[in-house]
Image (spheres, rainbow, N blue to C red):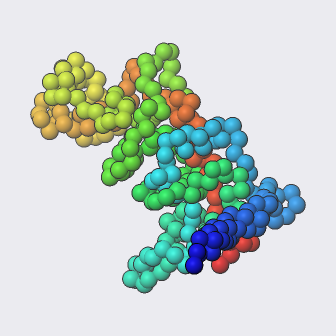
Amino acid sequence: MDRGMVIFLGAVLTFSSSWLGLVVFPFWQLGKQQPYQKDEGDEPYPQPLQGKALAGRKVYQNNGCMYCHTQQVRSEKFGDWWDANGEHKTGADIKRSYGLRRTVSRDYIYDNPTMLGTMRTGPDLANIGARNPSDAWHHTHLLNPRSANGWSIMPSFAYLYSREKIVGSRSDKALTLGREWTVDPGYRWRPSTKEWDAIVAERGSALVAQYTAGQPEPINIGTPEGKKRLLEFWLTTPEEEYQVIPNAEGDALVAYLLALRKAEVPLPEAKE
């Protein structure tokens, strides 16, 4: 007996029910959600992105940040950790300050696309704007993550910055980093032995004066140990003639990161 029609109808029914259950019903249930406002006069939550932050979302997307970072805070019932007494607890995301609560659908009503992420090679960024509100830190971290965490495996985004000669005074946007991170953006630079010997011969006295300012401990650059200590100090000082500043995409990406403040406002549906 020919069962082709039965198989066809079964396939249609299977895919139709899946589409209705996974697409249509959730859209009907959640598609009309509005910002939450507990009391009249309170600022509705969430707020749509605007200006640089809106442009920064595109930079975040284009650079594939969602492949290493999530934007979803898990329930307090998930994520194991142990306290100082060895007692087992859950809610690791809350413990790590990824958010004050779990994220829910309302947190994402203005996100298009929604950057939930695929894995956590790096930390969750759902509320990074509240967790770390320093734009200077984000810029130095993007230029070279090893400048903030020596063990970081995050790639450098040095192409979001430019190294240029200072004309007049240093720009307000210039990154406050030592020359070891700015001479060759994206890498950790150190002079060769020959280069350092030439620098010490030319500017040794001035560098020693700078090193010893406010320090009672003397330094003898006539010894290998003294020259090494002076080098380590000099590398942490800013370049005199050059500066590193963010380009438009770098500024926009940091503005977007600072705007990420999900899971900060209490929502009734987020209670557990």
Q: Is residue 171 left or right of residue 30?
A: left
Q: 184 and 70: which one is in front?
A: 70
Image quadrant assignment for residue 126: bottom right
On the image, which quarter does residue 271 sit in? bottom right
Quarter of the rendering occupied by the C terminus: bottom right
Question: Residue at the left extreme?
Answer: 223
Q: Is residue 190 left or right of residue 185?
A: left
For image coordinates 72% across by 64% down, the residue present is 24
Query: In which quadrant is the N terminus drawn?
Result: bottom right
Q: Quadrant of residue 25?
A: bottom right
Q: Position of residue 179 (x, y in %)?
A: 35, 31
Does residue 36 lie above or below 207 as drawn? below
225 displayed left or right of 111: left
Q: Tally the marks.
A: 0
- Camera sees residue 26: no
Q: Residue 166 location in percent, x, y? A: 46, 18
Q: Of 139 and 108, which appears nearest the observer?
A: 108
**Residue drawn 68% across and 60% down?**
107
**Vertical position of residue 29 compared to residue 142: above or below:** below
Seen at 28% across and 33% down, the residue is 189
Can see residue 107?
A: yes
In the rendered image, residue 159, in percent from the top left (x then y), is placed at 44, 32
**Residue projecting furthest to the front:** 1
Q: Residue at x 52, y 25 (%)?
A: 171
Check the image and name the residue furthest to the right. Answer: 40
Q: Residue 15: x percent and y percent?
A: 63, 67
